[in-house]
Amino acid sequence: MRLNLPDRFIRRCHSNRLGEATIGRQQIYIIPTRYGFGFALLLMLMWIGSINYANNLGLMLTFLLAGLAVVTMLHTWRNLLGLSFRVSRASQVFKGETACFYLQLINPRSDERPTIGLHFKNGDVIYSDLPPDCDQQVKLCITTERRGRLSIPRVQVFTTYPLGLFYAWSYLDLSGEALVYPAPGPRPQITNLPSYQLNAQGDKGVGADDFVGLRSYRPGDSPRQIDWKAQAREQGLHTKQFGGDRADLCWLEWDHYPHLGIEARLSALCRGVLDAVEQQQAFGLRLPNLTLKPARGETQRQAALRALALFAEAEQ
Amino acid sequence: MNSANQIKPAVLYHLTLVTALVVAPHFQRLDLRITLAFLAVLFLRWMTLYFAQWKTGRLLLFAVTIISAVLIFTVYPLLMGLEAKIALLSLMLGLKLMECRRRRDLMVVLLLGYFTLITHFLFDQEILLVGYVFIMVIALTGLMIEASRSTHTTGFRLNSLRYAASLVVQSLPIMLVLFFLFPRSSGPLWNLGVDNSTGQTGLSDNITPGSISNLIRSRAVAFRVDFDQDAPPPRQRYWRGPVLWHTDGNRWTRTTALQAKQITYQSLSPPVSYQVTLEPSPNNWLYALDLPEILPPEATLLPDFQITAKDIRNRRHRYSMTSRLEYHTGPLSRRERQLGLQVPDNITPRMRDLVSQWRSESTSDRELVNHALRFFRTELFYYTLTPPLMGENPSDQFLFESRRGFCEHYATSFTSLMRVAGIPSRVVTGYQGGELNPLGNYLIVRQSDAHAWSEVWLEESGWTRVDPTAAVAPERIEQSFDFDLEENNILGIPVIFSTADSSLLKQFAKQFRLGIDAANASWHRWVLGYSKEQQQKLLQHLGLGALSALKLALAMILATAVLIPLLLFLLRLGSQIKPDPVVRDYQRFCKQLDRKGINRFPYEGPLDFARRVVRKRPDLKQPVNAITQHYIKLRYGKADGPQLRKAFHQLVRQFRA
């Protein structure tokens, strides 16, 4: 936050193979805060005054406060020393949303550690007070700008406790990543795009005969198809869907959008996946490098979104 | 960062209280109006906290600032003197507290608070004050801790105060190192033009009737004396200060007309050696018992046995001295006779009549002196702290009308009478008596022991001390002047001396006071009097010899550098969590395996771990399973006992991966 050192000069804490990063003695930076400089000025004034008035007690008080400053520096440093961090989980979000990392702070000491501040570069600061010998979870969030794997950015952890005279901080390079899906694109025209595959067992298209299920209301839906009973039960506006099991299965294909760029195609496919899931349709996904067999449900959704997120990403 | 910048009202309440306490010792020194204004500002602050709807608006703040400024300039028009600066500081502190909204303001108030604490030492350096200041440092530090906490779930936590105390205590060793080793300079960095005449009392180089009785109200210590042998009896404890020769009939002053000469006198008693620790005073003279014989190097003896010294103003000074209590000063010089016989203009006929009556009844000067003393003893003279106001001619008025006076009245009028009689005489001011502190085995001489007496020159004994006060109030000489000032404050009431049979409570109070003073005395020697010279002495004592300032600074840094790891080590000891011995043994077992590349995952239970280990290292199957089973039994099972623990411990000890 305060220093912009070239990367190679920065001392950082890395996660060990268990994913835990512990702040060591040599990874803590410390500088006086503006209050610290104010305190130093105060000490100078007191010292000069005591010498000029030949006042030994004044000198003693000055030296007591000087000792206090030294001890405070030590305690500020110690407030970070030995603190361990682990990324316990990360949220999965669509591009443009805020990705959150859940950090576990571990205080292995029998002293409390109040006022531990955490933030990403230019991010919001989260404060945490750690009780003695205790773990605590904090959530650090960052706005996503591209799809794919998002490794946790460098975390800066700092404290000015106990007196606010010194600012001690440390850089954490933790291991942990969030998955960023492509942002869902505009809804493609529903008639021509998804390829509905004929099901051998039936010949029912999208129609008005068999009730298939509910989906949430979209503007333009016929009032006749709205599930008014559900609305009366205050369950929200839902539209009844009718059709047959021919519509049960749809393929979302890379080749459906020849006129779009890569990211736009991924966005469109993402929208398709979401729609299919909402309509409780089984769907398959066909990308140039990968094909997902048709299935339905949460697992399929995750697999599909993951495939879209990681499309053409270098494997890590 | 916003949450860290807000202060909770609870902290402000405590800040208000602590601010009041931090400034409190100044109340006795400040003008009452300033004190009241300061308290009013704090009260206003308290009100705005208590009634949250009363916002401390800019207008209110502005008004209070203007009022304070006007008040300061009314009371101290030119802002001259320490008191004015203290007043300014106090009110600034109050006003800053008033507008204290964010953390920055709070920190400014706290730093100003620390600064206010140091100003107390300019006026008072007793141990009690030091204790008070120490507690205030802890309180301010506690508030600082509270201010830097991110969440304020409760108000001021006692926890913070305890932590503050521990921080301050931890900084004590560093303070001692700095105090004793910080390179000292012998003089001030620059002259501040310190105005020490305010707030300090002490003898001055002239007296008028009433000047000593004002001084005597002060219980402040003038100096302390350690005797190398037994202290002389009270009636011999006359501490000579300024000697006064010239008078205009009212004021008596010193002389510069005496030529420096070889000073000799004939000693008639064994020498008395002692050390005097003089409290700071604006004067440049030293006090000695009667006639000084061996002087400290910085002192000069004047022909009238006054001692002056260089560079002792306004600081505590300690010196050694040897005196003779019985002596013969030898013949009188012409100049001395001339000075000792100056008669002021305001001698009245009835004074002359009185003297000539004595002269006719006596055959020698000595007899005349005795006549005069008998006059003071037999006539109805009162010894009082509050004599009536004297007019144009104080001696006459005192001798024949009011007859109520204090030692300076007796000494000056006696001296005047002697001069009328043609006997060379002079007034000596100083201290008489002193309280022997059995706990520290030294003498405390207070301002209330200030005294004035006469010296007359007689053919057979040279300059001879005559104390007319002793004739009127012999108790004054035999006892310490230890009376209750409150009781004796009414105009013209004779002084009642405390007697031996005063109540037990008073006796106890006196004992307590003496104990405090004994502590104070060593305090003065070791802390307040610590100087460059003593620093060098201490170093020599430690076998380091004299060190240059640079080496001293290095030694100081080195000592601090040793202290810090020591402190860290102690802190680490204090904060370590001691795990159960069983857990510790199991961790040791895991560490053994870890070294061989099999590390236990955080989520892995002992059984899973054991299974994995055995899969990787079938050769360890037997001991690993035994240890795991023991561990599970001890940690999770019902079986526990010293036997099983011991067996487990053995197993782990024997385990080699």
Image (cartoon, coloured by chain):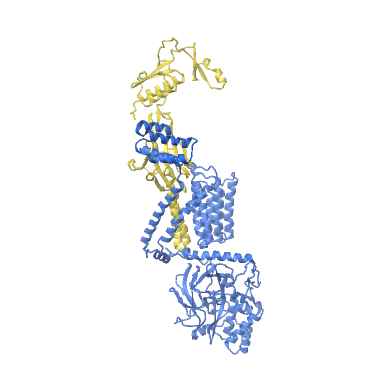
Chain colours: A yellow, B blue
Residue B518, position in %: x, y? 53, 66
Which corner quadrant of the image does residue B473 belong to? bottom right
- Where A165 sits versus B445, above or below? above
Image x and y of residue B481, in percent: 59, 71
Count of numbered labels shown in the rendering:
0
Relative depth, front residue between B591 and B290:
B591
- Which quadrant would the C terminus of chain A be assigned to in this image? top left
Residue A142 makes an appearance in the image:
no
| Residue A224 in view | yes
Tell me what residue is drawn at x 59 percent, y 66 percent. B510
Q: Is residue B458 above or below residue A29?
A: below
Residue B430 placed where, x, y %? 54, 74
Viewer-closest of B85 and B379: B379
Image position, residue B7 (x, y; %):
52, 45
Of A201 and B17, nearer the camera is A201
Near-viewer residue (B245 or A278) = A278
